[in-house]
Image (cartoon, grey):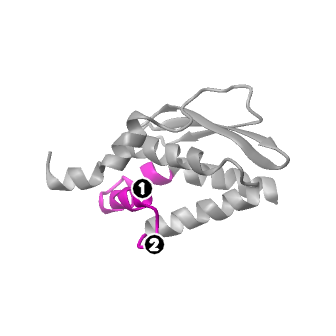
Amino acid sequence: MSESLKKLYHDLIMDHQRNPVGFKKRDEADIVIDAYNPVCGDKFTLYLDLENNKVSQASFHGYGCALSKAATSLLMASLPGKNLEQCQQLIESYLYELRYDSSGAEEIVKALSVALKYPGREQCVVLSWETLLKFIEARLT
């Protein structure tokens, strides 16, 4: 594998791809949101349960490249215990760190930010995050 691809498919990304957090279909969830990228075909369904206005359970199911699956896994791991406003702040922070300044970010975010150097790969690492952000913004207004 070339050095360029090794950077793109960092071990942390491959670990989330092979062992994703919350990879489980749950049609009975309180909130069910579809995230779809028609350009590359990545398609995930996000499942969230709310208890006392906080995310009590988060999971996802579907298919996509290693980058989109790893990014969605990271999202699911980050949501439990947060209310929707905190989820919104988390997502906005992730998108900022990813696109502008990952120097203080978690190692997995730094690894995912490498995707932005490859044409067409940004959508892979923001798909589920931006989809959930749009849902939250609509729900909070």
Return the residue nearer the eye: 119 or 88. Answer: 88
Q: Is residue 103 in the magenta section?
A: yes
Residue 15 horizontal/vertical position (percent): 37, 41
Q: Quadrant of the C terminus?
A: bottom right
Q: Residue furthest left?
A: 2
User: On the picture, is 58 further left or further right than 74?
Assistant: right
- Of helix, strand and loop, which one carries label 1? helix
Q: Residue furthest right?
A: 52
Tell me, yes or no, if residue 22 can be seen here. Answer: yes
Q: Is residue 72 above or below residue 64?
A: below
Residue 51 horizontal/vertical position (percent): 82, 42
Residue 13 horizontal/vertical position (percent): 37, 47
Image quarter of residue 59: top right
User: On the picture, is 59 further left or further right than 3?
Assistant: right
Q: Is residue 32 in the magenta section?
A: no
Residue at the image position 34 percent from the left and 42 percent from the top: 14
Residue at the image position 49 percent from the left and 43 percent from the top: 37
- Of helix, strand and loop, which one carries label 2? loop
Q: Overall secondary structure of the magenta stretch?
A: helix
Disc 2 crowd rating (10 Å Cα; few below 14, some 14-19, many 20+) is few
Residue at the image position 71 percent from the left and 50 percent from the top: 81
> Which segment did they paint magenta?
101-126
Q: Give the residue number, with chain letter if any, for mark 2.
A: 104
Q: Give the residue number, with chain letter if any, for mark 1.
A: 108
Tell me, yes or no, if residue 40 can be seen here. Answer: no
Q: Amino acid at mark 1?
A: Ile
Return the residue nearer the eye: 76 or 98. Answer: 76
Instruction: Estimate the spatial distance between the alpha carbons at disc 2 and disc 1, rounded to whole Å.
Output: 11 Å
